[in-house]
Image: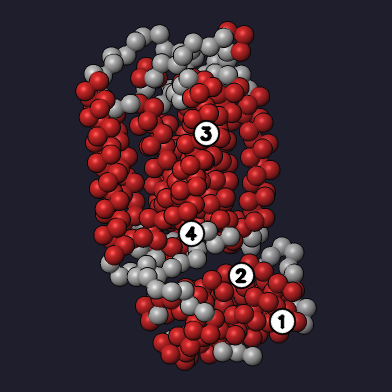
């Protein structure tokens, strides 16, 4: 959609600035998806590869967000570098907030999706009541820009929750999971061209680009054994950051996305019948999407979130296992050699922690991660619930042992819990 599709309401001249957002062209959507992919892969790399930890990573990026937002909002006009840096940082931060709710607080993804949907509805309601418009092309005052960036942050968190929830419901791999948001974005675009509300179409597409970009990042970063190409999170982040920088440089020179002033040419207004039909089409698509997810969820499968290193669940249902039940299930269904090997590595790691050899413990923790990932497919297929239970015990071991400032108490607690399930002392 273009600037002429959404005419902003008049503003008091004393507070008016030049537009703080880019023109909505194909470049906008390309760089938005690039930013979203970076938000997924870069956050995963810092949290897991550098062992900074999810909470600490979120704290770091919350501070970075505040600094970058202050810089962006101090400008009086749209600057591509500052604007897209803000989008990248908000993408990472929004992703981290959802991951904390899921991985740290144990909040189910459907609840996170509902909560963020409600928060976004509240933001839009207050924004509209105060400013009488939700148009991106009306961002030319400080209050409107504040509402805009708050909405952007919430859409990233909501898009993360919806995307992860879809993977949990369907069990789709990273390649197949790209198709759903891509098709939905195509439908929204067609409905907008038919005569749908451009503001509604914009924000729906904005939310959907988050799971699309994240799924692309997973497809590129995950190893072939997990359905990906195997570039890794670091290389994926570098490639997409380079693409963002190149695109921003091009836009800064060409000014192809600059809106110097509000559009003065009145765009043709679609007929009321087309507007109503567009709403009906979107409602039908929403119902069809829910039906597709419900049918897919009813089929036996393991959550695709297992491939992303997040806490997975067996979508076939069942009561979560107790520690005793998980231990019994692992002993009954997992090869004894695998259990013995994992138990030996965990025991070695615990001994090294007790001896104060943190470097050695970190090395053995990496051995544990490698051994566990190598046997993921076989063990998950043997008993999904037992695999999920142990996987959620492995993650705290890796985070605590490889933390920047390790806490021996947390290290020993996490290792002893894992050993108890694996049948160790």
Alpha carbon separation for disc pair 2 and 4: 19 Å
Alpha carbon separation for disc pair 1 and 4: 35 Å
Residue 248 visible in the current orientation: no
| Mark 1 neighbour class, 10 Å CA radius: few under 14, some 14 to 19, many 20 or more | some
Q: How is the image coloured?
A: secondary structure
| Mark 2 neighbour class, 10 Å CA radius: few under 14, some 14 to 19, many 20 or more | some
Looking at the rendered image, the disc whose residue lies closer to the viewer, 2 or 3, is 3
Determine the secondary structure under disc 3. helix
Label of residue 108 in the image: 4
User: Where in the figure is residue 282, as x and y percent of width and height?
Assistant: 28, 37
User: Where in the figure is residue 159, as x and y percent of width and height?
Assistant: 45, 46
Label of residue 352 in the image: 1
Which of the two discs, 2 and 4, labels the residue nearer the N terminus?
4
Label of residue 193 in the image: none
Which of the two discs, 2 and 3, labels the residue nearer the N terminus?
3
- Residue marked by disc 3: 123
Q: In which quarter of the image is the C terminus?
A: bottom right
- Residue marked by disc 2: 396
Give whichever of 293, 130 is nearer the camera: 130
Give whichever of 26, 202 is nearer the camera: 202
């Amino acid at each position: 959609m273009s600037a002429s599709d959404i005419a902003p309401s008049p503003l008091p001249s004393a507070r008016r600035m030049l537009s703080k957002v880019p023109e909505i062209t194909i470049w906008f959507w390309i760089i938005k998806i690039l930013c979203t992919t970076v938000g997924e892969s870069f956050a995963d790399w810092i949290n897991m590869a550098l062992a900074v930890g999810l909470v600490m990573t979120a704290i770091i990026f919350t501070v970075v967000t505040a600094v970058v937002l202050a810089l962006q909002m101090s400008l009086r006009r749209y600057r591509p570098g500052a604007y897209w840096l803000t989008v990248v940082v908000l993408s990472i931060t929004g992703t981290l907030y959802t991951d904390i709710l899921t991985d740290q607080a144990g909040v189910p993804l459907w609840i996170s999706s509902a909560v963020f949907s409600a928060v976004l509805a509240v933001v839009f309601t207050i924004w509209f009541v105060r400013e009488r418009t939700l148009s991106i092309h009306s961002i030319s005052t400080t209050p409107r820009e504040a509402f805009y960036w708050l909405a952007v942050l919430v859409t990233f968190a909501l898009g993360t929750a919806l995307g992860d929830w879809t993977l949990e419901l369907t069990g789709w791999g990273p390649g197949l999971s790209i198709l759903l948001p891509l098709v939905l974005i195509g439908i929204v675009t067609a409905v907008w061209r038919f005569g749908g509300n451009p503001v509604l179409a914009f924000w729906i597409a904005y939310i959907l680009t988050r799971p699309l970009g994240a799924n692309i990042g997973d497809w590129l970063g995950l190893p072939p054994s997990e359905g990906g190409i195997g570039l890794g999170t670091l290389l994926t982040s570098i490639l997409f950051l380079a693409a963002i920088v190149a695109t921003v440089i091009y836009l800064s020179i060409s000014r192809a996305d600059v809106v110097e002033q509000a559009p003065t040419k009145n765009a043709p207004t679609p007929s009321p019948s087309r507007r109503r039909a567009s709403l009906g089409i979107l409602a039908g698509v929403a119902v069809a999407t829910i039906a597709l997810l419900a049918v897919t969820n009813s089929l036996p499968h393991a959550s695709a979130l297992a491939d992303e290193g997040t806490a997975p669940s067996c979508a076939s249902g069942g009561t979560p296992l107790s520690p005793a039940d998980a231990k019994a299930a692992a002993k009954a269904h997992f090869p004894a050699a695998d259990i013995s090997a994992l138990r030996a590595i965990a025991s070695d790691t615990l001994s090294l922690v007790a001896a104060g050899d943190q470097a050695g413990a970190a090395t053995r923790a990496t051995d544990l991660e490698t051994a566990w990932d190598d046997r993921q497919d076989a063990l998950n297929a043997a008993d999904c619930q037992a695999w999920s239970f142990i996987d959620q015990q492995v993650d705290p071991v890796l985070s605590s042992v490889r933390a920047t400032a390790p806490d021996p108490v947390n290290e020993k607690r996490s290792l002893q819990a894992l050993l108890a399930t694996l049948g160790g002392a």
